[in-house]
Image: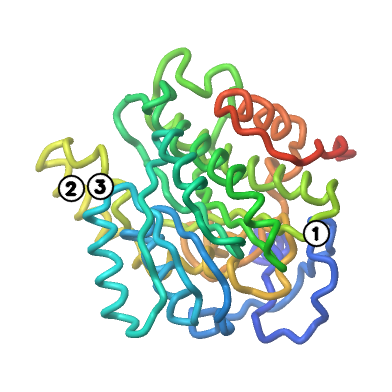
């Protein structure tokens, strides 16, 4: 594929200083496909004062950087972390890096739907402006969540699905609510099998991971379709961070995989993966660019979406597979017991 044809398959996003009218942010909003590539940094983030934000998995990695930069721009950020100890350390570190920041810790374990429900029930604020579904696990040995689901599917998708649904009333109470769900460039390699989402048959670590990340993309796009069908201003976006240094391959369940695994993985992360702040760019872009349409999928613009500047990817097959997305939604409501007060979207004509 030539450089010209590759560029034509991507639609770079406009920067936050674009003066175009906000208009209709729904999924149907036309997105320009030939805007010149420009570098974007967290310094481009507009003032976030007055926004109330939740970032899951915010004690380290992309989640921490996302929380820090939003707080730096004035947002009130809730760090939703599984470990109270590591979450407390993250809050203290963030306050030291951003003096005067408004941040707080809430404990949330996406591997336990009871914890998810408790988080939502104890929310305590009347609204929620932005939910960044960042938390997840990757390439972990086979295990099950507290509710009996395969861990990668249960945490990455079902926990995220349940949390968003339970917080939806608070999101809809905001003037301009957004949900940003972190998928992965690896989702492109998923062979999505609705009959083996929960490792009903053979468990393959990488297969389960990319399948759970495809589920994230299906969820984000179906949420936008349903919000559009209901006439809501809610904007749902998905992002891929690219090849990024984080503890997703060294933390959590990986802590028990031995010293050799840890040393080799850390060496790989240092030599082949880009710095964590680069990986957080797509999440921050989707969270803050004023005129970004709902339904956007933001990825790095480099080869294989592994590195580069944030661009909008609109030629991903999963974005148009409304039938599978609908089926996954119905299944997810049944498995989690969380039902969204949103109508089903009309069938896609594509």
To which residue does mark 3 refer? 251
Q: Nearer the viewer, mark 3 or mark 2?
A: 3
Q: Earlier in the sequence, mark 1 or mark 2?
A: 1
SS label for mark 1: loop
Marks 3/2: CA distance? 14 Å
Q: Residue at horizontal 29%, vertical 58%?
A: 87
Taking the view exactly as shown, the residue that stands out farthest to the top is 201
Q: Earlier in the sequence, mark 1 or mark 3?
A: 1
**x then y, percent, for residue 102:** 41, 76
Q: Is residue 245 visible?
A: no
Q: Residues within 10 Å of mark 1 (few under 14, many from 20)?
A: many
Q: Is residue 19 left or right of residue 211?
A: right
SS label for mark 3: loop
To which residue does mark 1 refer? 26
To which residue does mark 2 refer? 264
Q: Quadrant of residue 261?
A: top left
Q: Nearer the viewer, mark 1 or mark 2?
A: 1
Q: Are marks 3 and 2 in contact (CB under 8 Å)?
A: no
Q: Residue at horizontal 47%, vertical 63%?
A: 307
The answer to whether 294 is drawn above or below residue 185 in the figure is below
The answer to whether 39 is drawn above or below residue 299 in the figure is below
* Label at residue 140: none
**x then y, percent, for residue 147:** 42, 24
**x then y, percent, for residue 249:** 29, 46
Q: Are marks 1 and 2 in contact (CB under 8 Å)?
A: no
Q: Is residue 273 visible?
A: yes
Marks 1/3: CA distance? 37 Å
Q: Earlier in the sequence, mark 3 or mark 2?
A: 3
């Amino acid at each position: 594929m030539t450089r010209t044809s590759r560029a034509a398959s991507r639609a770079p996003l406009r920067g936050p200083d674009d003066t175009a009218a906000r208009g209709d942010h729904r999924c149907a909003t036309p997105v320009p496909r030939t805007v010149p590539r420009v570098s974007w940094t967290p310094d481009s983030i507009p003032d976030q004062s007055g926004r109330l934000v939740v970032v899951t998995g915010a004690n380290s990695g992309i989640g921490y950087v996302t929380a820090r930069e939003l707080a730096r721009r004035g947002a009130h950020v809730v760090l939703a972390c599984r470990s109270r100890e590591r979450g407390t350390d993250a809050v203290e570190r963030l306050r030291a890096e951003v003096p005067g920041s408004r941040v707080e810790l809430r404990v949330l374990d996406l591997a336990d739907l009871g914890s998810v429900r408790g988080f939502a029930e104890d929310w305590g604020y009347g609204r929620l402006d932005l939910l960044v579904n960042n938390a997840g696990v990757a390439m972990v040995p086979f295990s099950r969540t507290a509710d009996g689901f395969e861990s990668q599917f249960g945490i990455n998708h079902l926990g995220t699905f349940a949390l968003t649904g339970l917080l939806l009333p608070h999101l809809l109470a905001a003037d301009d609510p957004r949900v940003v769900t972190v998928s992965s460039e690896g989702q492109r390699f998923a062979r999505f099998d609705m009959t083996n989402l929960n490792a009903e048959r053979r468990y393959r670590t990488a297969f389960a991971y990319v399948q759970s990340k495809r589920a994230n993309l299906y969820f984000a796009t179906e949420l936008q379709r349903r919000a559009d069908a209901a006439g809501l201003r809610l904007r749902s976006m998905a992002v891929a961070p690219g090849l990024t240094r984080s503890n997703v391959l060294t933390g959590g369940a990986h802590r028990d995989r031995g010293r050799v695994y840890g040393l080799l993985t850390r060496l790989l992360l240092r030599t082949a993966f880009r710095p964590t702040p680069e990986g957080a760019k797509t999440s921050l872009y989707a969270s803050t660019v004023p005129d970004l349409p709902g339904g956007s999928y933001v990825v790095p613009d480099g080869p294989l979406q592994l590195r580069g500047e944030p661009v909008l990817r609109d030629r991903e097959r999963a974005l148009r597979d409304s039938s599978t997305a609908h089926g996954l939604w119905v299944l997810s409501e049944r498995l989690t017991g969380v039902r969204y007060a949103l109508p089903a979207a009309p069938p896609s004509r594509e």
